Image (cartoon, rainbow, N blue to C red):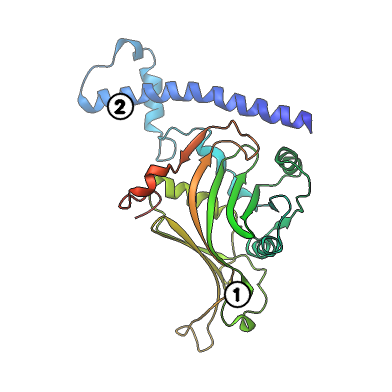
Amino acid sequence: MLRRNRRLAKQYCFRKSKETLERTKYEKKRKITASIQEGEPITNELRNEEAKLRQEIDLQDDNTAVLWTHIDDEYAKASKRDPKILLTTSRDPSAPLLQFTKELKLVFPNAQVLNRGGQVLSEIVESCRAHDYSDVVLVHEQRGKPNCLTVCHLPYGPTAYFQLCNVVSRHDIKDNKAIGTVPQAYPHLIINNLTTKLGEQTANILKHLFPVPKPDTKRIITFTNKQDYILFRHHIYDKPGGPKSVELKEIGPRFELKFFMIKLGTVDQYEAQDEWVLKPYMNTAKKQKYIGN
């Protein structure tokens, strides 16, 4: 495992060093494009490379014309395989937290629950890397109520932190006798009103926790943003009277997510750089929305 980690670290450092060369070439292409559009002569430092760079500019499309970094590449290969998620809790979890974790296991396909015990985060992350997990989801509590959800993407991050609000378990939903069992089919996702750049990144983190469903799946999971709170709902639908009559039934659980921090590293790297943090003074700006309209 140590050899594998060294190899992955070398590959990561190589990609970062390659970014410097790509950034230099991108700046040269941008200067040449600007000179052509404004009708100005090419500068002396770019004349030797002008013909080669012009040929590359002509072959560019919407994807290759943008400068991509290792930060943008975190989820580039996530769609090539189904996610494999490890669910765990804080130490000494209460009974409501264990119950909520079991319900999250029904929400996320291909998820496995780990009893935390005395394991530290670094051991959990190293073990997940060795067994090819794609994400680690940690659930924390305060006074017996779940209050924080942490989503860590492997092998290098990012790590997103969400505050859990208004958690309603499956057994607490009205008419819980009619809920029945949760289907194991991969769900369709509805992601609504995550329109800003930060909102798109949040949607990217959430949607890669679920595999690609089949077209005829009758299970639906909704993430909708309202006043920077992401409302989570879990439904199944049926068409008893034909295609024009649809019955929607909630199967739970139900909760709200408040996105408050994202780090560039994994959850065990306390020294990792903060990409975005919800500061205390930002709560007073009621008219400003950070992840959607």
Q: Which mark is residue 49?
A: none
Residue 76 visible in the picture: no
State the residue at coordinates (57%, 32%): 272
Looking at the rendered structure, the kind of residue marked 1 is Asp
Please tell me how crowded label 1 is: few (under 14), some (14-19), or many (20+) other residues with Cα within 10 Å: few
Q: Which residue is mark 2?
A: 33
Q: Nearer the viewer, mark 1 or mark 2?
A: 1
Q: Earlier in the sequence, mark 1 or mark 2?
A: 2
Percent coordinates x, y for residue 148 in the rendering: 58, 53
Instruction: Check disc 2 and give the amino acid type.
Output: Thr
Find residue 26 and report its horizontal and vertical position in percent: 41, 26
Taking depth in this image into account, of 141 and 169 the one nearest to the observer is 141
* Residue for badge 1: 172
The image quadrant of residue 143 is bottom right
Q: Please, which residue is most extreme toward the bottom here?
A: 241
- In the rendered image, is residue 259 in sight? yes
